[in-house]
Image (cartoon, grey):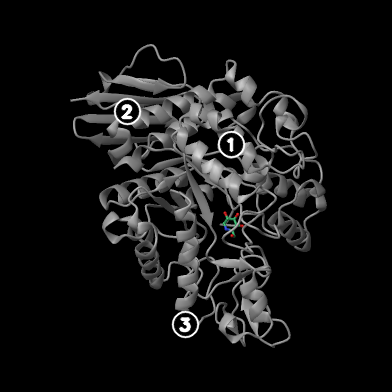
């Protein structure tokens, strides 16, 4: 299947390239940089939401599903983007936020004005449950003066839609069809595993378990219905569901091809291995044992049961992986390329978040006022309320804020990293003096390494299609796996630490060819020494 050979690149449009000087990235900026993406070799680009929105949650609060926010350009610009990208072999994936709408959306406004038809578009109750919003506080807010409450699993300006109402589903499917007709070939469905709420809503018994509204069985029914009504009619379309608090069992069900739900799923377990007691707003080192066993569990089970994973280290909601998993001051290049190998040679579709291919890192901001993200501000207040000093609370925000990923893309050393000639909506960082596309193209190691990984996936079926087996699962420093497909076998070993280590290779691979490595390797011996953050992939053709 062709989709397995593709690598997807994520653009956060607000921060990619501004062509108007208003400090916000735009569609024409993306068009301008298409040749750069083609040079990298990616074949699909996922754009975070570009629809009209009050931007309370950076576009995840949509007020019109079938238009382009003037902040980013016009519908003509979007059509131009689709066409120009296609000419370079790149398709566009849009972000469909179908769990909730902005409270400024006409549906919510009509509901508030008393229209019963639209009130049934939302989840209104006389008594709230104990559910908490993912951005802090209760997940229920008063519905005007009605005495009722509406559900908002995210910000109170993001009202959850009532998928139990067939008219809501029909309206949302029209949205998908609208963009499909424009030539969009990919859909990323935001928090899609929370759309299926039960008829009778129950309190959560415990918050460390799965919230009551997650992965309900009816979600699978809704996805099948959406598949049938929309993208299921076009085999070229790629869909990815963002899954919150999910399980491997459910993700297998969401993605087994014969079930006709989604192409693949994002899960976040591997990016919670540096949470203390499961809490995001803490500062703890990553737990390698946990990371490794999650990779093995998901890799093996998905492989045995024909599910398909979307793999990523970075996105617009995560601090940079280089700051989390690597001693970045000393080993930025080795760490970046090792992390890349660990997912690009894996079974599943790799995603690259803008700037990852040049090794961008978290910014050094000095004040809470430098941050824009609503979640970071809520968390800062919550940490102060828990009794942390402002300095201690700020230190955690610096580590965990989503804005770490949202800083402007670094093109060169000109003002604001070449992102804008105006004032960027979120400050650019001094790291741009050394970490930028122009510098990386002149002797950097990360960009060419990504180019090579992307090309390998297209040329070696064992990477795109092979099965997955864990290798040395007990090794204290190495995450290793074996892929097999027809006459090809591939062994990948990744040293996750800044210290050298030894790994014993199975005899089968000692005579293998080095397909890719990020550090000098003169000879493959059975006892192989891996340098700090070294990755080695050995290919055998039987
Ligand atoms: C997940 C998105 O990735 C995030 O940015 C957003 O805030 C929530 N969903 C709510 O839509």
| Foreground residue among 382 and 41 | 41
Tell which circle, 1 or 2, labels the residue nearer the N-terminal end. 1
Query: Mark 1 or mark 2: which is in front?
Result: 1
Residue 529: horizontal and vertical position, in percent? 41, 20
Residue 143: horizontal and vertical position, in percent? 68, 81
* SS under mark 1: helix
Residue 16: horizontal and vertical position, in percent? 64, 39
Tell which circle, 2 or 3, labels the residue nearer the N-terminal end. 3
Ligand 1 placement by image quarter: bottom right
Determine which residue is flagged by label 1: 31
Which quadrant of the figure contains the N terminus?
A: top left
Q: Is residue 61 above or below residue 46?
A: below
* SS under mark 2: helix
Mark 1 surroundings within 10 Å by alpha-carbon count, few (fewer than 14), some (14 through 19), many (20 or more): many
Mark 3 surroundings within 10 Å by alpha-carbon count, few (fewer than 14), some (14 through 19), many (20 or more): few
Tell which circle, 3 or 1, labels the residue nearer the N-terminal end. 1
| Foreground residue among 408 and 32 | 32
Image quadrant assignment for residue 100: bottom right
- Furthest-top residue in this view: 522
Tell me the distance, in whole angstroms, between the alpha carbons under discs 2 and 3: 49 Å
Tell me the distance, in whole angstroms, between the alpha carbons under discs 3 and 1: 45 Å
Image quadrant assignment for residue 356: top right
| Foreground residue among 69 and 346 | 69
The reply to whether dot 2 and dot 3 touch (C-beta < 8 Å) is no
Residue depicted at x 37% and y 38%:
346
Determine which residue is flagged by label 2: 459
Q: Is residue 465 above or below residue 174?
A: above
Residue 113: horizontal and vertical position, in percent? 69, 82
Mark 2 surroundings within 10 Å by alpha-carbon count, few (fewer than 14), some (14 through 19), many (20 or more): few
Task: Say the numbered circle drawn on residue 199.
Answer: 3
């Amino acid at each position: 299947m062709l989709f397995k050979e593709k690598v997807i690149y994520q653009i956060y449009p607000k921060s990619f390239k501004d062509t108007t000087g208003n400090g916000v990235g735009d569609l024409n900026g993306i068009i301008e940089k298409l040749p750069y993406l083609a040079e990298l070799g990616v074949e699909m680009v996922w754009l975070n939401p570009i629809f009209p929105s009050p931007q309370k949650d950076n576009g995840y609060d949509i007020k019109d599903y079938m238009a382009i926010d003037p902040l980013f350009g016009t519908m003509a610009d979007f059509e131009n983007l689709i066409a120009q990208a296609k000419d370079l072999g790149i398709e566009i994936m849009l972000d469909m936020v179908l769990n909730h709408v902005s409270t400024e959306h006409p549906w919510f406004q009509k509901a508030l004005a008393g229209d019963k038809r639209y009130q049934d578009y939302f989840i209104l109750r006389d008594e709230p449950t104990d559910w908490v919003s993912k951005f802090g506080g209760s997940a229920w807010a008063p519905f005007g003066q009605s005495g009722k409450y509406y559900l908002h699993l995210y910000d109170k300006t993001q009202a959850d839609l009532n998928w139990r109402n067939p008219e809501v589903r029909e309206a949302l499917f029209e949205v998908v069809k609208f963009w499909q007709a424009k030539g969009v070939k990919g859909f990323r469905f935001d928090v899609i595993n929370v759309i299926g709420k039960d008829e009778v809503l129950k309190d959560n018994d415990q918050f460390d378990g799965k919230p009551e509204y997650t992965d309900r069985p009816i979600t699978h029914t809704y996805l099948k219905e959406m598949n049938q009504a929309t993208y299921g009619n076009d085999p070229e379309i790629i869909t990815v569901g963002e899954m919150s608090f999910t399980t491997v069992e459910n993700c297998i069900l969401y993605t087994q091809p014969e079930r006709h739900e989604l192409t693949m799923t994002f899960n976040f377990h591997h990016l919670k291995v540096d949470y203390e007691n499961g809490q995001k707003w803490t500062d703890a080192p990553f737990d390698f044992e946990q990371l490794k066993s999650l990779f093995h569990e998901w890799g093996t089970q998905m492989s045995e049961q024909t599910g398909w994973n979307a793999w990523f280290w970075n996105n617009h909601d995560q601090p940079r992986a280089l700051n989390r998993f690597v001693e970045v001051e000393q080993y930025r290049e080795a760490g970046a390329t090792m992390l890349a190998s660990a997912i690009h040679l894996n079974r599943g579709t790799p995603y690259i978040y803008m700037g990852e291919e040049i090794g961008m890192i978290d910014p050094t901001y000095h004040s809470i006022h430098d941050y824009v993200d609503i979640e970071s501000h809520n968390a800062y207040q919550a940490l102060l309320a828990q009794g942390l000093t402002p300095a201690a609370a700020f230190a955690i925000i610096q580590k965990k804020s989503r804005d770490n990923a949202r800083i402007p893309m670094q093109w060169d050393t000109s003002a604001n990293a070449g992102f804008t000639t105006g004032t960027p909506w979120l400050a650019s960082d001094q790291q741009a003096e050394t970490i930028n596309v122009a510098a990386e193209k002149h002797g950097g190691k990360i960009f060419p390494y990504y180019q090579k990984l992307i090309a390998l996936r297209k040329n070696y079926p064992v990477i795109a299609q092979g099965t997955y087996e864990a290798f040395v699962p007990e090794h204290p420093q190495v995450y290793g796996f074996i892929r097999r497909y027809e006459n090809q076998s591939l062994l990948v070993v990744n040293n996750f630490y800044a210290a050298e280590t030894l790994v014993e290779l199975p005899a089968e691979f000692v005579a293998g060819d080095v397909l890719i490595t990020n550090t000098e390797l003169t000879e493959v011996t059975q006892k192989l020494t891996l340098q700090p953050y070294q990755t080695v992939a050995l290919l055998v053709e039987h």
